[in-house]
Image: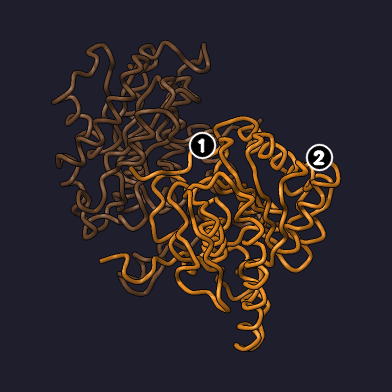
Chain colours: A orange, B brown
Amino acid sequence: MPEFCPGYVREPFTTLAATYPDETAYPSDDFRTEWGPIFHRGRLDGSARVLLLGQDPGQHENILRRILVGEAGRRAQGFLAKLGMTRSYVFLNALLYSVYGGTGARYVSKPRVRDYRNLWIDALLSSGNVEAVITFGAMAKKAWADYASVHQPPSDVPVVSLIHPTFPESAGGTKAEKQANTKKMLKQWNDALQMLHPAITNKDVPGTQLALYGDAFVDADKAEIPSGDLPAGVPRWMYRNDGWARRVGTTLLGKRRNITITVPDGVIP
Amino acid sequence: MPEFCPGYVREPFTTLAATYPDETAYPSDDFRTEWGPIFHRGRLDGSARVLLLGQDPGQHENILRRILVGEAGRRAQGFLAKLGMTRSYVFLNALLYSVYGGTGARYVSKPRVRDYRNLWIDALLSSGNVEAVITFGAMAKKAWADYASVHQPPSDVPVVSLIHPTFPESAGGTKAEKQANTKKMLKQWNDALQMLHPAITNKDVPGTQLALYGDAFVDADKAEIPSGDLPAGVPRWMYRNDGWARRVGTTLLGKRRNITITVPDGVIP
């Protein structure tokens, strides 16, 4: 039977998903608050062994109402798979709303943004089951530092701060520069894998042998987003690949007000 | 604290939301199966006193993943409010997917479509709490007849078959014809209200006095879709009014593959 995400049905997540900071904490000049907050992806039932922190949701996440569901998500999912983790993980973002413009990062440590996020992190760690924390990107690294500075994260849980999965693309540059950035990122990820692989003792796929990355992503390095991470009934093309949601417009405001969804080739017979 | 819909977290709904009929039961030539099934709106916890059946989801429903969230939903919600019902109701549709073209109605009674829908109806009636059944439109009327012909609905629960809330618009015609259709529909709805008002004894708003419709809708005749019927974090403009989701394209297939979302005026400051 295909699984789907049950959503925010357990406390404290029910209350957290109903009492999120709005545009008084995330100003509309700097965040796409009009699309609503996007909270998480993965297990909220205490079974998560790995806590991953990302940055902010994009347009695909705005539609699916779960985070890291596109290419960055598939790369992160592949990273988890190399650790033998196919289910027992949970993703949070540093920010609840899509950053608009370039100043979103300065909000990561603002008290209301930070304190709300820390409630989530605290709740997820309170299971006592988390064996590793992984941050992707600078905002996520800062988010963890903010947490660790005021709470008492378990001292025996390793924390690794990694380059964001789509940094090579978002950094731009020539094809050679992108390749170099990818290689550098995967080198860093490989180092982390070697540390994390023995640290995560409760693997979803026991006996998983560590297969490191090469200098570039190959198909086997990415993994599908599981249906169990998405709401019921979401069509598979929406979490198989991204690119189906775009912000389209001829003016800045027009573009901001728009999300255009296009079903990929081949889905409609 | 704002509420949100907890989704499909209780059996048999968890299993039903994971095992829905796909394009082998709803052919892609006649249904927009590419957007996924849309199951319901309202209470699945046994507290529903009114069961309402609608027709098929549209593009707004495809995005929000709940049914009757647009103008038809606001009119149905207003109808419920006149009965003192603001919470204890549940909506199902005759069909899980948007009809494509004009032949969707012929599938309402097909065994796999019918049998799956009957599992939902059966589960909702099994609470023993439903005090009235309301169908909107011909397909919904047929769906109920299909259920009643093979199951044993409680004989003391009144069933009313009403004109679909947006029939006056979908029927087209001149402004005068639309007004006449609205008047005719509201006359029928008034008759139903007078029968249902005393039949629904467990009202969410006890002591609600029956206020009938006039010849046309006034603002007070419609009611907002409650946040408690939508997934967590959905922005309010998405369930305040419809019109924000359109199928746009220059070819039939292009249009079918598209949903264009536009944030309404005034939402972004």
Mark-to-mark CA distance, 2 and 1: 42 Å
The answer to whether residue A169 of the structure is visible from this angle is: yes
Quarter of the figure with residue B108: top left
Quarter of the figure with residue B1: top right
What percent of the width, then of the height, locates residue B128? 34, 14
Question: As displayed, is residue B132 above or below residue B115?
Answer: above
What percent of the width, then of the height, locates residue B103? 18, 53
Label 2's element? loop
**Point 73% across, 68% down: residue:** A101
Q: Chain letter for mark 1, please.
A: B
The answer to whether residue A70 of the structure is visible from this angle is: no
- Total of numbered circles in the picture? 2
Question: As displayed, is residue B55 above or below residue A135?
Answer: above
Quadrant the C terminus of chain B occupies: bottom right
Amino acid beneath label 2: Gln
Q: Which residue, given by chain and number where applicable, does mark 2 sit on?
A: A152
Q: Which residue, given by chain and number where applicable, does mark 1 sit on?
A: B225
Label 1's element? loop
Rendered image: mark on residue B108: none
Amino acid beneath label 1: Ile
Q: Chain letter for mark 2, please.
A: A
**Point 27% across, 25% down: residue:** B122
**Point 55% across, 60% down: residue:** A73
